[in-house]
Every structure is written in structure tokens, then in C-alpha cells.
Amino acid sequence: MKKIFLFLIVLIVVFSSFTRDKNIKQYPYQNSSLSVEKRVADLLDRMTDEEKILQLDMYRGNEFSNKLKHESTEYSEEITSNTLGNKSVGSIHDFYPLSPEITNQIQKYALEKTRLGIPILFIEEGLHGYEGLGSTSFPIPIQLAAAWDTALVRKIGRVIATESRAHGVNMILGPVLCLPRDPRWGRVEETYGEDPYLAALNGVAMVKGLQGKNLTDPDAVISEPKHFAIHGIPEAGSNTSPVSIGEREARSTFLYVFEKAIREGGAMSIMAAYHELDGIPCAVNKWLLTDILRKEWGFQGFVLSDLGAIRMTLNEHKVAKDTSDVLAQTFKAGMNMQFYDFKHDAFKRAMIEALKNNSLTKEDLNKAVADVLKVKFLLGLFENPYVDSNLKARVFHTTQSQELALKAAQQSICLLKNENELLPLNKNTKSIAVIGHLATSTYLGGYSNKDGKGISILDGLKQRAGNTFKISYEQGYVTDSCKFQPELLQKSIDLVNNSDVAIVVLGEDPKNVGEGKDRANIELDECQMSLIKAVYKTGKPVVVVLFNGRPLTISWIAQYIPAIVETWFSGEKGGLAIADILLGNVNPSGKLPMTFPRSMGQIPYYYNHKPTSRHKYVDEERSPLFSFGHGLSYTTFEYSDIQLTPSKIPVNGTSTVSVKIKNTGKIEGSEVVQLYIRDEVGSVTTPVIALKGFNRISLKPGESKIINFTIGFEHLSLWNRDMKQVVEPGEFKIMLGSSSSDIRQKAILWVTE
């Protein structure tokens, strides 16, 4: 009997090994010791066409879980089962789980109750903070660029990744690497500014921060730079409008930024843009998505459509006859996943039709699916699909992350004007009148959680000032109607007259800035201008604090108001950081990442323009109001002793540029030393001046440092008449300064054959 009993036990064990969950290391694709390529190939061989098509589709969060406004509140087996059945899908977006357990339950269903157990990508937004409720909110990207500190941006990327992954989110839609040359465009705030070099270095820093050391780590997410490509110069500044540009200019500037994100940052996803580029919509542009991105740059990830971009290609660009046709064009060009373009059933039917009529081949389909699967394998989702439920409590909105948000805001606020050293407010100031409804705004900027709140400028001043100053507030006018009520204006004027100094907060209401909020006029509205002019007439010292997401035309203010501070949308600690600048707790060091035009007629006005872009008008000055790279300090810096070693190099050589920087003021401060280059004679036209290096340094009073830059191929090359990137022999002007219009030291570098 004992032998029979043992035999039965053996039979049970053997039988159970065949009947237990089929997803436990049964097939080669589940064997982590094999290469990703072999695992992808094996899995593809086992998938039906329908299962492959589902991997190219994105689902909404409410198709899987109960949601309360923005966030998913709890897991629903019924909803998930109705959505998935026994097949997995490519990704889920707009989900934002309040707890990682919700993500884990959906992932558990995908692994254990679908035929092949393919995990799901959870994709969310996070341009300057994970968009989930309660996350750490940093300054908007255009402001992060104003810090000119890529190490800071990389640290912020680490926080965003950590807080996202702690919720089960494993991919973030960002950074935005468009170069906005037209401030009318509403999405300027999402970018790193107009310059390709500055944007590229910040882009690489953010990509590396998001993706971490290893994608399988519990604090890493896939980074997806967008919008590919050349989305930042839409016709008339109107979002998704056509773009017409030559290949040389595209490669020299707009494509360069993405190339750095791929080659140096290692970004594993890219978002294809909405617009048409020289007549070809980006969603079906094989030259962009395959020839440049994959073949030339070696991109190894997958391409996601921007929301509805494929549908726009069909319905608005009208380069396809029906859904099947546009999808065939899209996936043949190099796309890998739709973004809410077509309903799931319609998407599947159209894809199957394209396969049947051979407008899309099985090889095309397999290539598209393979890239999506590869990313899932690289994230380690097949081996470690679940999130540690205790991780969120340890890493979410920590004290250290909040301190980083404060530091980022402090470093990136720009002092644009400070006549007679009105700022910082001195000890003789006893009372401050804070004027303007934006002084109480807690807006965090676009792509922030709508329920998130920052510290307002008024509250920040009150917290930092304590009992040192008497701080009083008046809103000035009725904000909804933008109409003055005489009593409101009079209250503001009375308050200013009874105070030592007025701080007037002006800028953009959230309803007028951000995605889909392009402006025909970037001047301040009539109410704000009437308010500031009335305050100015009191004769009291006036400080204008700008609260905005794009450069504004503020020529009257720049002419008459003695002090102007650009604070952008400074994140959750913005009010404290702004108060620190105004009160002198922190010495301002931010530098503009985008030119401020004098008037609408100057647009587009970007600093690195070509020689014949003169901006010559009979009714306007040629210069900008505030130049790219401009930003003042409460101390002064002296530049001296520029050296080139050597001063003559071959076309494949390098030279070291050094300059001495000294703090000649009375307090400690940080300076952003900027290196610019001008190619004096080229086979093609080149910018009058172009940023090719920068270095942020901190100096105590009287202290000096030697700053070094290395100049080589990347800094001296151009795309010649044969569309080859080369360094041409000749004379290069080397310029070092505090902004693009404040050059302190010059030298000549000669490049020989």
C-alpha cells in the first residue's frame, strides 16, 4: 500500500506540472536566460493575428477600473474581464491608480487569465511631475530649462520615474523636445526653449533620469520624447498646423534634439506628431519613422501615435481613402501603436482587412508588434510584473523630493530688470501691497494633476516674511469678466498709496495657456495693463512678477516698471521660491531659454537666426525685448583672460576654451557662463550666433574660477550642400558671455584642412 501511495503522489505531481498555469516557464519566451530577440521571436510565432493587433492598441483606464475623476480608485474583475476576455492588449492610459494594488490586479489578470500571459504597459503623463494625485510637482519644463542645470533636470526625472513606477506605471509620455520659435503656440510651456543645444542636453538629462540605470529597476520607466518631429513651429503658431522646412534646417536644429535623446539618452519610445511636414503627415512619414529614426539613429524602441494623429491623417490631412488604408500606411511607415485613434473593434477589423488585401503584410505586422514586445521584455514585466505595494509609502512625495522642487524653482526664476537695485526688498520696507488676482493662483502648469495645488505667491510671501513686513492684498479687478469695478481698482490704489512698495502679479490665466490654447495676441489683456498703469501713476516703487507659460510682449512694462521678475509656473513650492527671490533669501540665477519679442510683429524672433533675418521695420526696433540667455543677479560677474588651446586645429581636432569668472559684487551668486560660436564663412548659411556650451558656477564675493569648454566636431559642424555633416576649414568666432546679447570675451579659432 505504501508503494501504491507513493506512486499516486508521483502521478499527481507529474500531472499537476502539466495542468498548472501554462505561463510558468513553459515556453522559450518565458525563459529569462534567453536573449530578448529570441524571446520576442518565439512569442510572435505563438500569437494569432488578432493577438498581435491587440498589442498595437491603447486602452483607456475606465475600460479596466472604476474611476473617480482623474484617478482609478479600485480594481474591478468584472470590468477587466469584459474588456480583455482571454487576450492581452498593448497598453493602458489615463488610468492613474490611487494604489499599486489596482495595477497589480490588472497585470495579474493579463498574465494568468489570457492565453499567452503578455503583460500590459501602463502609460501616463509626467512632463514636470507624475500626473497622479499627490505627486511632487516641479516647475514647468520651460522654467526647468531656465535653470541651465542638466544635473538638476536628471534628478527631477529620477523623482518622476520613482513616483510613477511605485504606482505600477512603467512609461511616461515625455519629454517634449519641440523647439518653439513662435510664442503664440500654447505648448511653449512644455518645452525646453528655442535653442537646440540647450533643449538637447536637457532632453538627454530627462530621458536618463526617467529610464534610470536599468529598465528592470523598480524606479525606472520608459521615456517617450515627443512630438516627432518639428512640431514646435506650426503655421501661425496654431497647434497641429502644417510645417514647411528644408531638410538641412531640420537636421541642424529640430531633428538634432531628438537624435541626442536617442543616441545619448537611449530613449526607448517616441511619439509621432499630428502635423504634416512638407506635405506628408508625420504619422505616415517613412523618412522620419524608419529611415531617420531607426536606420540612421539606431532607435530600438517603439513609436506611439499622438492622440488621434492617425485619425487626423485620414479625416483632415486626407492622404488615405479609409481606415484600413491609413493604418496600412501608418504601420508600414514605422508606427507601433495607436493612441485612441479608432475604436478597438474598428481598429481590429481595419487591420485584418489590410492584411487580407496585402496593403499591410505579415512582415509589417510582425515588425510593429516585435518592437512593443521588446520594450515589455526590457522592462522585465514578464518576470517581475508586480509592484511592491509598500514602495509608494517610501518614495511618494518625500521631503527630499519637495526640497528638490523648491530648489528647481529658486534656480530657474529670472530677474529681467532691476533698476536702482529695487530688489531685493530691503529692511527699510515695512509694508508691501500685493496686487492682482494671479497672486493667489495655485496653478501648477499644464500636465499637472488638476486637483494638485501649489503655494501661491501671496501665501509664499506671507510665510517667508513672517512679521518682518506687513503684507496686504487686493485683486484689482473682476477676473471672470476682465472688467474693472471702480471700487476694486480704488481699493488697490489706496493700498499701494499706503504701502512702501507694490508687487503686481501679471501674466496668463490657465484658460489661456497650454495645449490647444494658442493665442493670436501675447500681450497682457486690457484689464492687466490698466491695472499696472494705475499702480505706476501712484509713484510708489513697483515690482512686476510675471506668472505665465510663454514669453509675453511687455514693452510698456519693460520701459516704465523698475523691476521685473519672470517666475513662470513654478510648481508646488513656487510661492516660497518667488518670495525667496523678492526678499533676498536667494540670489536669482535663472536665464531665459526663449527670446522675449518687443511686439507681435517681430514674431518669430529667435536668437540663432540666419544673417538675413534682420527684423528691420520702420515702426519697431531690431533687437528683442529680452534676449535668449538673459537673466540678472544681485551681484556682478567679471569675465577675463579668454584662452584657446590650441587656437588652430584640423577639421577632426579639438580645442579647449577657458575663461576666468570673478564675482565682483558683495554677495554670493551663481552665474551661467554661456559659450557661443559663429562660423564666419560656410558653404551654406549658418546662424549669426549659436549656443555650444554652458556652465553654471557659484562664487563667493571676490572669488574667481577658470571655466573650460572643449570644442570639437559637434560644435563646429554643419550640413553642407551635399547634405553631409562636416567641419569646414575656416574662421570661427568664439564668444563667451552672460547672454546671447551680452558677450564679454571673444577669440578666433582657425580650422585647417
Image (cartoon, grey):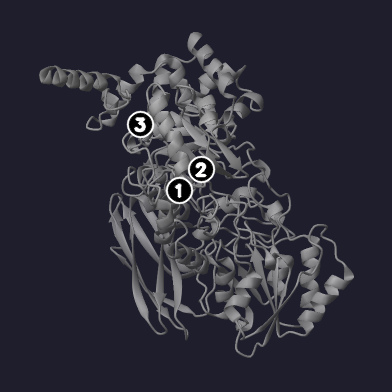
Q: Position of residue 612 (x, y in %)?
A: 58, 51
Q: Are marks 1 and 2 in contact (CB under 8 Å)?
A: yes
Q: Give amino acid for label 3.
A: Lys
Dot placed on the residue nearer the N-terminal end, 3 or 2? 2
What element does badge 1 sit on? helix
Q: Give amino acid for label 2.
A: Glu
Q: Position of residue 219 (x, y in %)?
A: 37, 49
- Please report the residue visible at 78 percent of the width from the left and 61 percent of the height from the top: 479
Q: Are marks 3 and 2 in contact (CB under 8 Å)?
A: no
* Snapshot quadrant of residue 560: bottom right
For label 2, the residue is 124
Dot placed on the residue nearer the N-terminal end, 1 or 2? 2
User: Where's the N terminus, which quadrant?
Assistant: top left
* Snapshot quadrant of residue 628: bottom right
For label 3, the residue is 374
Q: How many marks?
A: 3
Q: Are marks 1 and 3 in contact (CB under 8 Å)?
A: no
Mark 3: few/some/many CA within 10 Å (<14, 14-19, 20+): many
Query: Is residue 530 found left or right of 567 in the rendered image?
Result: right
Asked whether 545 or 166 is in front, the reply is: 166
Question: Disc 1 versus disc 2: distance between alpha carbons?
Answer: 8 Å
What element does badge 3 sit on? helix
Dot placed on the residue nearer the N-terminal end, 1 or 3? 1
Residue closest to the far left: 3
Residue 338 visible in this rendered orientation of the protein: no
Question: Disc 1 versus disc 3: distance between alpha carbons?
Answer: 21 Å
- The label number, if any, that marks residue 164 in the structure image: 1
Residue 69 visible in this rendered orientation of the protein: yes
* Snapshot quadrant of residue 732: bottom left
Query: Is residue 663 found left or right of 312 in the rendered image?
Result: left
